[in-house]
Amino acid sequence: MISSQYPFDQWYEYIGGRGDQRDAMMDRIANGSHRLELKGPSMREKREKVMK
């Protein structure tokens, strides 16, 4: 399982490394994977207001 705060379409930039290594990693991550993308307001903002 891999999780990230970055949208999937931005992972390529954040992985770094040489282009062929990056391509190979993204191929392995993306092919046959199931992605759940959460949308909506941040729960952290609500929690910070309650803590104050």
Image (cartoon, rainbow, N blue to C red):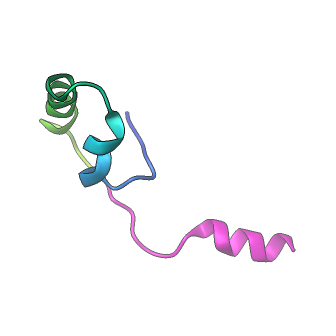
Q: Is residue 32 magenta?
A: no
* Identity of the residue furthest to the front in this view: 18
Q: Is residue 42 above or below residue 25?
A: below
Q: Quadrant of residue 33?
A: top left
Q: Residue shown at 15%/25% (left/top)?
A: 24
Q: Is residue 49 magenta?
A: yes
Percent from the top left, x then y, of residue 43?
Answer: 60, 68
* Viewer-closest of 26 and 47: 26
Q: Is residue 44 left or right of residue 25?
A: right
Q: Is residue 21 above or below residue 31?
A: above
Q: How many marks?
A: 0
Percent from the top left, x then y, of residue 42?
Answer: 55, 70
- First to last magenta residue range: 36-52
* Viewer-closest of 6 and 19: 19
Q: Quadrant of residue 29?
A: top left
Q: Quadrant of the N terminus?
A: top left
Percent from the top left, x then y, of residue 51?
Answer: 84, 70
Percent from the top left, x then y, of residue 35?
Answer: 26, 49
Q: Is residue 20 above or below residue 40?
A: above
Q: Residue shown at 87%/74% (left/top)?
A: 52
* Identity of the residue furthest to the right in this view: 52
Q: Quadrant of residue 50?
A: bottom right
Q: Residue shown at 33%/56% (left/top)?
A: 7
Q: Is residue 16 above or below residue 40?
A: above
Q: Is residue 33 left or right of residue 15?
A: left
Q: Residue shown at 32%/32% (left/top)?
A: 16
* Viewer-closest of 49 and 21: 21
